[in-house]
Image (cartoon, rainbow, N blue to C red):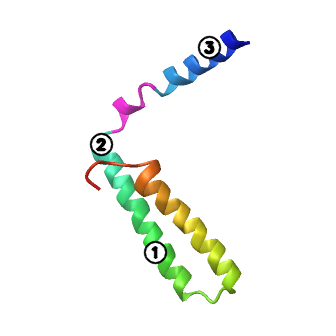
Amino acid sequence: MIEWGEEQLTGIHSAFAGISDLVSYKTLRYLKAGLLLLILEEYDNLKKSNFPKSLYQIQKDKIEDLKSLAEHDGLNSSDS
């Protein structure tokens, strides 16, 4: 069973090993900038909405999660 798991992990690692060769750092920076712009637009839309307080908070939490992903987890860079 352990050997099977190691084989599966090796297959996954080799499938993603070449991605860094296909996507440049500059492309990732543009992706991050676009995502942060969309997040700001969602904040503006949320402020203009007439949602009930509980629904407003749920939407705000989802936007915060996406912002956290963009800034720290998924697309982190040293000079952002």
Residue 16 higher or lower than 32, as above or below: above
Residue span colored magenta = 17-23
Q: Is residue 10 above or below residue 56?
A: above
Give the percent coordinates (x, y) of residue 32: 38, 55
Q: Who's the residue at 30% across and 42% down the image? A: 25
Instruction: Name the quadrant containing residue 12.
Output: top right
Q: What is the secondary structure assignment of the residue under circle 2?
A: helix
Hey, what amino acid is under mark 2?
Answer: Tyr
Image quadrant occupied by the C terminus: bottom left
Q: Position of residue 36 (x, y in %)?
A: 41, 64
Q: Residues within 10 Å of mark 1 (few under 14, many from 20)?
A: few
Query: Which callout, 2 or 3, points at the residue further toward the start of the chain?
Result: 3
Disc 3 marks which residue?
7
Q: Residues within 10 Å of mark 2 (few under 14, many from 20)?
A: few
Q: Which residue is mark 2?
A: 25
Q: Quadrant of the N terminus?
A: top right
Task: Residue at the far left: name it.
Answer: 79
Mark 1 or mark 3: which comes first in sequence? 3
